[in-house]
Image (tube, grey):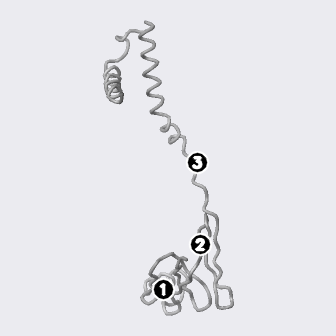
Amino acid sequence: MTNIYFVERKDGLIHGSQACPNPPIDDNLRSREVAAEIHGGSPDDWQGRMVEVEPLPGQYIESIAADGKGGYVVNQKPVPPPPPPSIKEQLAATDAGMIRTIEDILTALVVKKLILKTDIPQAVLDKIAVREALRSQLK
């Protein structure tokens, strides 16, 4: 069970809700002030409430409404799937494999004498040498 805390105006309007283990029902002046600022009236028009809710698996609590009979209706909705990775994230995920592929292609081109090592910038050769040395330590 989850405790959901919110403030309710005397006419049944509900402002805000949050899951919390120790709801501030006895000391909720700030919550009542915020509700009064947003919805009107005075903080004394609002009262702290708490309901226990059994969250449904894979769902989140979207809203709480008075049911008109002295109780509350809790609306739960499915948790939306995470957004797909951006193009930048998808590219970044392939970087390590591409680096190794490029190293292998450069090595093959040099071995086949299609390019000379002197055709490759020294900074690139240095980076490849560092990576080769590190890979040799893995074996």
Residue 60 pos. (x, y %): 59, 68
> In the rendered image, which residue does mark 3 sit on?
84
Q: Which label sits on residue 18?
A: none
Along the polypeptide, which appears first: circle 3 or circle 1? 1
Farthest residue to the front: give it.
Answer: 139
Residue 63 pos. (x, y %): 61, 75
Farthest residue to the top: give it.
Answer: 113
Q: Amino acid at mark 2?
A: Pro
Of circles 3 and 1, the one toward us is 3
Task: State if disc 1 and disc 3 touch (CB < 8 Å).
Answer: no
Q: Residue at x 59, y 75 (%)?
A: 54
Mark 2 element type: loop
Q: Reply above or below: 107 against 49.
A: above
* Spatial CA span between label 3 and label 1: 39 Å
Q: Residues within 10 Å of mark 2 (few under 14, many from 20)?
A: few
Mark 1 element type: helix
Q: Amino acid at mark 3?
A: Pro
> In the rendered image, which residue does mark 2 sit on?
55
